[in-house]
């Protein structure tokens, strides 16, 4: 399937032909599932999955679409011991014209390549992988909801499958793609718990890649957030309590900043922030609107609390492919609830709504956009 | 098998009886493998494995010893996406008296419990798990080498198996134990590469637990270490370049410290250091010897470089169950090689040898010790 830059550069002799999406083998399921109407995010999967194996000697093997089912993994598999693993998340939408569209999928492919490099998993050809995903969507296209703004969530996953216990670059890997009903991720305005005692990511780590290890360590803090009646953690960083991410979302403030300027601001990509596709799209769209300042800048809890006190915060929201754009209603910080009671202007602006509406126009093909990719 | 504290406290009704090691079901393999003589660490596994499933409704299920073989896992399994996973490492030794001994296994069980809590995996009864491991060792006892100082490496592994994609505490989990030939981990004095641009662990993270996510992110730096002809990374922390760990080892300096005192020193357990069983045993033994100062204290690269320059470093070594005690011969730091050429006293002291000899006396039953646990 995928070309392997190391092999192409002549450093290693190719042992099999480079495989292309066109070589893909399809084994159709003989018993298709019922498609439930409403489900929680990520609990019901479609009938088929894509998988492609890689090994250091033979390179990428032929991509296979097969009935959805369990993986058979060696118990020493490097993903299970050392979290040599990464994933992506994207969605496919059904348009008013019945056609299926992906939203900026090349950004996902690009980010996946960067994660693979960071995880010491092999390089792959991004457009070949996207071609294989397109075939998988075509086969399970009936799973993309026909009514409303429903969509199907696509989860490319890439794991090391080295069957030995030395901590080293794996000689075997498996790239697979599963798809599930997206459901609703959060139904209401979110409440966040901000406490510096847990850190999501740090300089010199992997916080800017979508690697599994960034997530497992967050469950404990999320549980503690629950004990404060909050749904998610607002991750802080450093002694000045910089705002970084919220749960698994990028964070935006729409406010009148310290200099009196109206600004939409989100933390910069300095190595500890995941470069979200929705984050990038919000920045791109807001810059195109040119109605207020749009900044990638450091934001601290002190600045946020001052803005709340001085009624300068118009709106705060999180963004991500799974959760889309989700307003933040309150934050528990230093044992106090920081919310709209502190700021009468909290609810007045609706930039999150405008962004949501615009994205939906593109995603469902109601407004032409070069951000969508027809399946 | 394992009691579940949450269920015992009455917060959840038990739906099945609590299982004990005595209930363990054994399915013996009908085709035993040949046992190769010399192998790399962690590449050849014994004939059987232990597995115990858990789910939120039914609690712990009956422990099973079965022929070693692949795991069947749902492709959305939370260990594969979010690194909800942890492991332990311990060894079983054959004594001169032919009896098999584990080395301080209760410390491993205790650390595994702490990792499970941090990973939001369920609590288990430590002595019941140890009882099951003992049964597994008995069944595969012929795999423990009969000659020399060979031993068998035991890898308890605990993974979330929740089959859905929400980032949350898993409702299903699998605890399994595999065993492999230990081989030799490092054969020579180690060379380390110290560069502050990568960080292994940080305050508020999971560096003090044996969770998979601590390892996958290190491969990239390890690869860069290789480009400097170094075998492992010496992990630094903070602006003063504190020495934390080396590769997957705890680090010790035996030196004449800044105050002119002979000292064996290792970084303190401040949240970013793995509480190694070998580390603890070195501290315990050296304190018992009472021949020099034994300290858990911060150590910086500046202090180490000064000691080398002033010929105050007697020895530097790493410790871990897999690598045992391994001398460090040189460090590449700030583009310079820091090694014995800078310090004529580098090779004079052999505290690492004395420690190694003492541990072997206990492990192989040549000297009585309450640190060993008869199988």
Image (spheres, coloured by chain):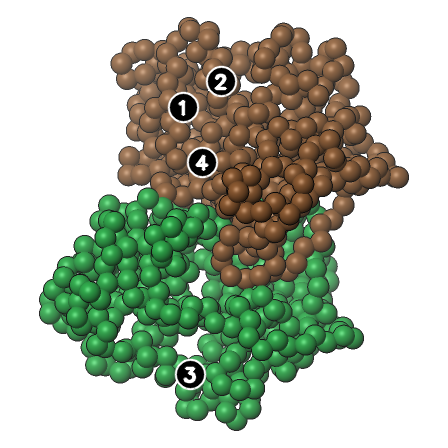
Chain colours: A brown, B green
Q: Are marks 3 and 2 on the same chain?
A: no
Instruction: Please name the residue that numbered disc 4 is placed on.
Output: A208
Q: Residue at x 53, y 35 (%)?
A: A113
Kindly tell me whether residue B323 is visible in this rendering. Answer: yes
**At which x and y percent is residue B96?**
50, 92
Query: Which mark lies nearer to you, 2 or 4?
Result: 4
Q: Name the residue furthest bottom.
A: B97
Q: Label 1 belongs to which residue?
A: A266
Mark 4–mark 1 contact, CB under 8 Å?
A: no
- Please tell me how crowded label 4 is: few (under 14), some (14-19), or many (20+) other residues with Cα within 10 Å: many
Count the marks.
Answer: 4
Vertical order, B79 against A203 (above or below): below
Assess whether mark 4 and mark 2 are in contact (beta carbons under 8 angstroms): no
Q: Position of residue B325 (x, y in %)?
A: 37, 72
* Disc number for residue B360: 3
Q: Secondary structure at mark 3?
A: helix
Q: Report how far apart the C-alphas of labels 4 and 1 lie in the structure.
A: 15 Å
Q: Is residue A247 above or below residue B33?
A: above
Q: Chain of mark 4?
A: A
Residue name at image x 80 percent, y 41 percent: A67
State the SS at label 2. Answer: helix
Asked if residue A46 is positioned above or below residue B328 in the image, the reply reads above
What residue is disc 2 on? A282
Q: Are marks 2 and 4 on the same chain?
A: yes
- The residue furthest right is A30
Quadrant assignment for the C terminus of chain B: bottom right
The answer to whether dots 4 and 1 both sit on one chain is: yes
SS assignment at label 4: loop
- The CA distance from mark 2 to mark 4 is 18 Å
């Amino acid at each position: 399937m995928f070309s392997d830059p190391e092999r192409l550069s002549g450093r290693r002799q190719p042992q099999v032909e480079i495989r292309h999406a066109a070589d893909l083998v399809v084994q159709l399921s003989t018993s298709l599932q019922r498609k439930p109407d409403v489900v929680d995010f990520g609990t019901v999967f479609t009938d088929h999955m894509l998988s492609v194996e890689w090994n250091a000697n033979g390179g990428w093997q032929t991509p296979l679409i097969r009935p959805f089912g369990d993986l058979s993994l060696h118990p020493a598999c490097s993903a299970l011991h050392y979290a040599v693993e990464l994933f992506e998340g994207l969605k496919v939408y059904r348009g008013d014209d019945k056609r299926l569209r992906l939203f900026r999928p090349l950004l996902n492919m690009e980010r996946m390549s960067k994660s693979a490099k960071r995880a010491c998993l092999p390089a792959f050809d991004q457009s070949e992988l996207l071609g294989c995903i397109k075939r998988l969507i075509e086969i399970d296209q009936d799973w993309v909801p026909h009514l409303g703004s429903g969509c199907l969530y696509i989860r490319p996953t890439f794991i090391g499958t080295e069957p030995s216990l030395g901590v080293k670059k794996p000689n075997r890997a498996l790239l697979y793609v599963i798809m599930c009903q997206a459901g609703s991720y959060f139904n209401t305005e979110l409440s966040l718990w901000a406490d510096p005692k847990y850190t999501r990511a740090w300089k010199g780590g992997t916080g800017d890649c979508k690697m599994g290890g960034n997530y497992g360590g967050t469950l404990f803090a999320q549980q503690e957030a629950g004990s404060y009646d909050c749904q998610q953690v607002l991750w802080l960083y450093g002694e000045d309590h910089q705002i970084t991410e919220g749960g698994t979302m990028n964070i935006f403030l729409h406010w009148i900043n310290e200099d009196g300027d109206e600004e939409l601001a989100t933390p910069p990509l300095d190595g500890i922030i995941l470069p979200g596709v929705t984050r990038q799209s919000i920045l791109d769209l807001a810059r195109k609107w040119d109605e207020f300042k749009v900044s990638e800048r450091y934001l601290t809890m002190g600045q946020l609390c001052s803005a709340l006190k001085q009624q300068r915060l118009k709106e705060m929201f999180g963004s991500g492919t799974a959760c889309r754009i989700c307003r933040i209603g309150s934050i528990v910080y230093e044992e106090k609830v920081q919310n709209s009671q502190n700021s009468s202007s909290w609810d007045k602006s609706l930039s999150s709504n405008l962004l949501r509406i615009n994205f939906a126009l593109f995603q469902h093909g109601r407004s032409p956009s070069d951000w969508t990719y027809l399946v």
